[in-house]
Each structure stands twice: as C-alpha cells, then as structure tokens.
Image: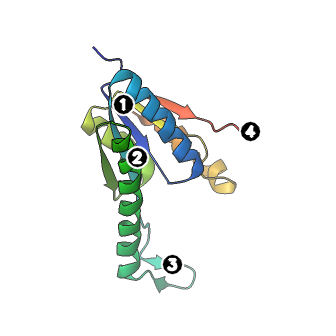
C-alpha cells in the first residue's frame, strides 16, 4: 500500500507554487500517487468600489479561461512526467475550496507553497496556506522556496 494515493496541489501559478508542484511531483513519483491540481477563481463583488464600476461579465469569463489554460499547461507537465492526475478550477474562495475539494476527492496530502497574501490583509486574514493547514481534512505539506 502506498503512503499517499492522492495528492492535491493548489496553485496560483506563481514561482512558489511552481516549486511546490515540483515537490509534489517528486512525492507522487515516489509513492505512485495520483496528482490533482487546483486553482480558485472568485470575484467577490460584481462592482468595484468606491467607483461602483461593474466588473464586465466577459472579464470574469476571460479570467476563468486563462486560469484553465494555465492549469492545463501545468497538467501537461504532470502527464509528461508519467503521473496520473486531474486539474480542478474552483469557483469559490481558495481556502474553503481547497479543503472541500480535498474532502470530496479523498486526498491524503495537500502540497502548497507558503508565499501568499502579504501586508495588512495577511495580518488581518492570515494566508491561504495557514487557513488550509487549520481546516484541511488531511495532512498539509507547506513548501518554502529557499532563495539561492
């Protein structure tokens, strides 16, 4: 029996997320695990304040299409490495979406980067990685990219 059967890798397509994916791919190879990638695209309000300018419908659609392309590109790397898996585009906030997807897929491990939101918003809300560690139904490996 493999240590991990399913590994979930949330990504924001940053360099740190890329590094976490590399680590997850190495783990998946070593344990013969299935790799699932996910990205969350959520628009909190249809109107941008303080100007009350509505976000155009085609903007949201274009953002989802771009995210899907990036996910597909990442999935191509996974498949080229000989790994099985699937990409998931979430239409909700990242932190509850990641945990819910992990639950529904029966994921054994979540692998994600540690760099997230910074500044005042980070102080008030915490990072996606921190909230995922607290709420995930499985173990979470946070990958810190070391500067060389």
Neighbour tally class for label 1: few under 14, some 14-19, many 20 plus, Cα within 10 Å: many
Q: How far apart are marks 1 and 2 (CA)?
A: 27 Å
Q: Which element type, helix, strand or loop, lies under badge 2?
A: helix
Task: Single out the mark in the foreground, 4 or 3.
Answer: 4
Residue 54: % across, % down: 44, 83
Task: Single out the mark in the foreground, 4 or 1.
Answer: 4
Residue 32: % across, % down: 32, 25
Mark closest to the chain's N terminus, 2 or 4: 2
Per the image, the residue denoted by label 3 is 48
Neighbour tally class for label 2: few under 14, some 14-19, many 20 plus, Cα within 10 Å: some
Task: Single out the mark in the foreground, 3 or 2.
Answer: 2
Residue closest to the eye, 136 or 52: 136
Q: Where is 51 relative to 36, above or below?
A: below
Q: Residue drawn at (44%, 27%), measured in percent from left and top?
A: 27
Q: Are discs 4 and 3 less than 8 Å apart at CB?
A: no
Circle number at residue 77: 2
Mark closest to the chain's N terminus, 4 or 1: 1
Q: Distance between the residues labelled 4 and 3?
A: 39 Å
Per the image, the residue denoted by label 4 is 148
Q: Where is 26 relative to 48, above or below?
A: above
Q: Where is 82 relative to 69, above or below?
A: above
């Amino acid at each position: 029996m493999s240590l991990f059967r399913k590994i979930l890798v949330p990504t924001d397509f940053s360099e740190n997320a890329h590094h976490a994916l590399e680590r997850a791919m190495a783990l998946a190879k070593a344990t013969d695990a299935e790799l699932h990638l996910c990205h969350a695209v959520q628009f909190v309000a249809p109107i941008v304040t303080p100007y009350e300018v509505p976000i155009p419908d085609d903007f949201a659609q274009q953002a989802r299409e771009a995210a899907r392309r990036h996910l597909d590109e990442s999935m191509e790397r996974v498949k080229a490495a000989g790994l099985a898996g699937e990409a998931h585009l979430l239409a909700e906030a990242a932190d509850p979406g990641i945990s819910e997807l992990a639950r529904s897929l029966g994921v054994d491990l979540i692998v994600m980067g540690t760099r997230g939101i910074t500044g005042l918003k980070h102080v008030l809300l915490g990072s996606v990685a921190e909230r995922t560690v607290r709420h995930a139904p499985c173990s979470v490996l946070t990958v810190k990219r070391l500067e060389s």
